[in-house]
């Protein structure tokens, strides 16, 4: 349902070990925008799993769902999350001072954003780093079907036209 978070488990394909999760929240009023988040257990950080998971989520959000803009918020002190968002080509748009309670105190947060055109490189300039994308340009047909079905269960309004458009973009 727009305005509610939907979580995707991130697991190691070979063993099925749960590594963490990615989350997606389609904006309730502006349904062409979404917010993403991600969490990985400490023992699985620094191995590229978050980069791959967030890349695949962005592929689905922009490709399968046809959204226009995605934002992410990270604690300023979370250097790994900040580096990941910047490596994926997300642009830092804002700093929120003491906007979140964390470990008994207040923490600053950064707001990052990326547009669909930027993700696909249409507007990429020399001053924007090339993202390290470890997934295919589009989700597999099976993954796309799973995402559409899961979001439909949560009443995300996806028109028949969008479904037809995303199906035309899937690899054969």
Image (cartoon, rainbow, N blue to C red):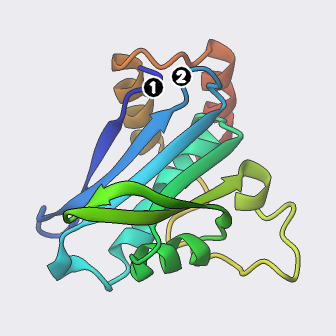
The reply, left or right, for residue 73 in relation to residue 111 is left
**Residue underneath mark 2:** 28
User: What residue is drawn where x is 18% and y is 77%?
Assistant: 42
As helix, strand or loop, the secondary structure at mark 1 comes to loop
Mark 1 vs mark 2: which is more N-terminal? 1
72 or 115: which is nearer to us? 72
**Circle 1 Cα neighbour tier, 10 Å, few/some/many (<14 / 14–19 / ≥20):** some
The reply, left or right, for residue 120 in relation to residue 7 is right
**Residue 165 image position (x, y, % from top left):** 69, 29
Q: Is residue 121 above or below residue 68?
A: below
Disc 1 versus disc 2: distance between alpha carbons?
A: 4 Å
165 or 85: which is nearer to us? 85
As helix, strand or loop, the secondary structure at mark 2 comes to loop
**Residue 160 image position (x, y, % from top left):** 62, 14
User: What residue is drawn where x is 69% and y is 17%?
Assistant: 161
User: What residue is drawn where x is 38% and y is 25%?
Assistant: 149
**Residue 6 image position (x, y, % from top left):** 34, 35
* Circles 1 and 2 in contact, beta carbons < 8 Å: yes
**Residue underneath mark 1:** 3
Q: Is residue 96 above or below residue 158?
A: below
């Amino acid at each position: 349902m727009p305005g509610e978070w939907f979580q995707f488990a991130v697991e190691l394909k070979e063993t099925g070990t749960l590594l963490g999760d990615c989350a997606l929240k389609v904006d309730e009023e502006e349904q062409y925008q979404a917010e993403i988040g991600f969490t990985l257990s400490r023992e699985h950080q620094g191995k590229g799993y978050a980069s791959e998971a967030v890349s695949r989520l962005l592929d689905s959000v922009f490709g399968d769902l046809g959204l226009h803009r995605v934002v992410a918020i990270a604690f300023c002190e979370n250097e790994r999350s900040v580096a990941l968002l910047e490596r994926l080509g997300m642009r830092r748009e804002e700093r929120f001072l003491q906007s979140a309670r964390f470990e008994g105190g207040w923490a600053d947060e950064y707001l990052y954003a990326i547009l669909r055109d930027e993700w696909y490189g249409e507007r990429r300039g020399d001053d924007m780093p090339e993202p390290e994308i470890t997934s295919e340009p589009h989700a597999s047909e099976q993954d796309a079907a799973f995402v559409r079905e899961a979001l439909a269960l949560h009443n995300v309004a996806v028109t028949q036209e969008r479904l037809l458009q995303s199906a035309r973009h899937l690899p054969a």
